[in-house]
């Protein structure tokens, strides 16, 4: 017997038939003798609709009261939790739904992007023991203790709910059922030869997730790493009846790197086309200039990603390049233009048709020359590199967006990630 947490995302609970399919997955685990908590998302499209209603309700103001936004958007998960509990009961399985305030899931009071502070799992465990009751928990929501108001965890937040629940009830397994059957070496829509990874280290997954592999919310991976919750990503579309409860289902285990025996040098390649580049030419080369540039950007809540500064030749001026999300491009330009007197520069160059390609792997810590191989491979294909940044386990290249697919495919083959076909 094991204690499990199972999470089902929006597409997996999109209608009553799929909810029935989810219930059969739960039944399979109950029949195998396990204690089960389930965390659900809102049915697909529901949260988007709720957000749109909040925006539509404003006729004169520009921003809404985030506490009321949370009161509205939290309801999506409540519907799914109740429906799944009804479906399970209909199959003669003892089950009940839980909303965030009932457990409770205590969070900070940063509405619309609250952080989980604590979850009390005692009552769930008592019920597993005494009545084998399945706990169906509404993901994405919690409550702020002092104000007693409902909070939500930010879009995609039910991933974080499930990892926190797993930690709270000391689950043996945390299974994320989703519309893909695991984490891939890169996006299979771009590289058909992308392979599913059997295992990926938390740190690698953090990079993959934050770089646009949309499998899991970044914060949920962080939480898994801190609390050491092993997370198994698997498909919810497999027929529950076809799964051997004692076998090894296909999927990807996100775990500590110590659990990965055969570590490859490169694990995956992530890319993002939503980048914009801003280059500030001939800025003063003196203390305080970086602060004069990035201070106002931070104050405007603009996330700066790559930063490259040259060492000046004459000791007087230099060039500085950075990237921001394409959505923030215009705002970032405005901020820099406004701060021009404080920064002091000759001119701005910028581009929005750029993409960032990142190569990720824990093995890079102990292997030299990994990035150098990429530079030659891209050069052979006449792909120009605009900027490079590196960290211990990844390097990122800024290139022209038109070459994104070619670059990703080239690097995917270069590092031996292509699926071997018979
Ligand atoms: N329903 C929420 C969203 O769509 C939370 C989640 O699904 O993880 O963002
Ligand atoms: Mg999701």
Image (tube, grey):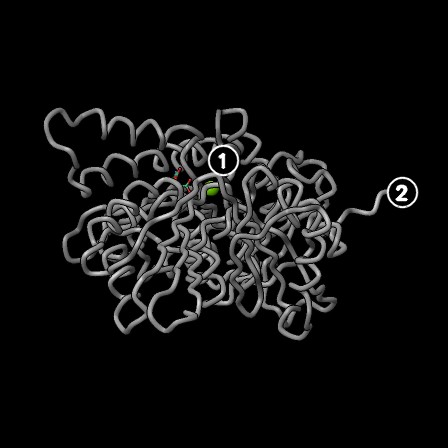
Can residue 240 be seen in the rendering of this structure?
A: yes
Q: Position of residue 29 (x, y in %)?
A: 60, 47
Which of these two is toward me, 268 or 152? 268
Q: Which mark is residue 182?
A: none
Q: Position of residue 155 (x, y in %)?
A: 37, 43
Which of these two is toward me, 373 or 262? 373
Quarter of the rendering occupied by the N terminus: bottom right
Local crowd size for mark 1, using a 10 Å CA cut-off: few (<14), some (14–19), many (≥20): many
Q: Is residue 114 left or right of residue 147?
A: right
- Name the outermost residue toward the front: 314
Q: Is residue 232 left or right of residue 249?
A: left
Q: Residue at x 42, y 60 (%)?
A: 307
Q: Which mark is residue 422?
A: 2
Q: Is 391 rendered above or below residue 189?
A: below
Q: Residue at x 47, y 35 (%)?
A: 10
- Name the outermost residue toward the right: 422
Q: Is residue 43 left or right of residue 110?
A: right
Q: Which mark is residue 88?
A: 1
Local crowd size for mark 2, using a 10 Å CA cut-off: few (<14), some (14–19), many (≥20): few
Q: Position of residue 370 (x, y in %)?
A: 68, 65
Q: Nearer the viewer, mark 2 or mark 1?
A: 2
Instruction: Estimate the spatial distance between the alpha carbons at disc 2 and disc 1, rounded to whole Å.
Output: 43 Å
Q: Residue at x 28, y 53 (%)?
A: 114
Q: Are marks 2 and 1 in contact (CB under 8 Å)?
A: no
Which of these two is toward me, 222 or 362? 362
Sooner in the amino-acid sequence: mark 2 or mark 1: 1
Per the image, label 1 sits on a secondary structure element best described as helix
Q: Is 303 rendered above or below residue 290?
A: above
Mark 1 residue's CB less than 8 Å from ligand 1: no
């Amino acid at each position: 017997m094991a204690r499990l947490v199972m999470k089902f995302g929006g597409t997996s609970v999109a209608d009553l038939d799929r909810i029935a399919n989810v219930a059969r997955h739960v039944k399979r685990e109950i029949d195998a003798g396990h204690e089960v908590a389930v965390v659900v998302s809102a049915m697909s499209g529901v949260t988007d609709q709720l957000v749109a209603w909040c925006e539509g309700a404003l006729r004169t103001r520009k921003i809404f009261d985030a506490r009321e936004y949370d009161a509205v958007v939290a309801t999506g998960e409540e519907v799914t939790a109740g429906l799944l509990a009804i479906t399970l009961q209909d199959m003669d399985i003892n089950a009940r739904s839980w909303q965030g305030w009932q457990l409770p899931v205590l969070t900070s009071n940063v509405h619309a992007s609250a952080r989980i502070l604590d979850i009390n799992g005692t009552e769930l465990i008592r019920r597993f023991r005494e009545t084998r009751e399945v706990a169906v928990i509404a993901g994405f929501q919690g409550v702020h203790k002092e104000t007693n108001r409902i909070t939500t965890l930010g879009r995609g937040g039910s991933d974080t709910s499930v990892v926190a629940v797993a930690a709270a009830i000391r689950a043996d397994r945390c299974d994320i059922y989703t519309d893909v059957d695991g984490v891939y070496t890169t996006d299979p829509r771009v590289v058909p030869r992308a392979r599913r990874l059997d295992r990926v280290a938390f740190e690698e997954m953090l990079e993959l997730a934050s770089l646009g592999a949309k499998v899991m919310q970044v914060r949920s991976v962080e939480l898994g790493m801190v609390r050491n919750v092993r997370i198994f990503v698997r498909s919810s579309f497999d027929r529950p009846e076809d799964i051997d409860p004692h076998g090894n289902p296909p999927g990807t285990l996100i775990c500590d790197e110590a659990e990965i025996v055969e570590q490859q040098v490169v694990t995956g390649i992530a890319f993002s086309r939503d980048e914009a580049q801003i280059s500030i030419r001939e800025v003063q080369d003196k203390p305080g200039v970086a602060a004069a540039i990035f201070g106002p950007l931070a104050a405007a809540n603009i996330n700066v990603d790559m930063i490259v500064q040259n060492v000046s030749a004459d000791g007087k001026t230099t060039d500085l390049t950075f990237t921001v999300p394409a959505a923030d491009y215009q705002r970032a330009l405005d901020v820099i233009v406004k701060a021009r007197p404080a920064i002091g520069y000759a001119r701005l160059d910028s581009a929005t048709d750029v993409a960032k390609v990142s190569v990720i792997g824990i093995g890079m810590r102990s292997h030299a020359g990994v990035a150098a191989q990429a530079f030659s491979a891209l050069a052979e294909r006449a792909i120009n590199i605009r900027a490079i940044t590196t960290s211990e386990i990844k390097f990122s290249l800024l290139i022209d967006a038109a070459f994104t697919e070619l670059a990703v495919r080239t690097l995917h083959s270069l590092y031996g990630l292509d699926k071997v076909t018979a």
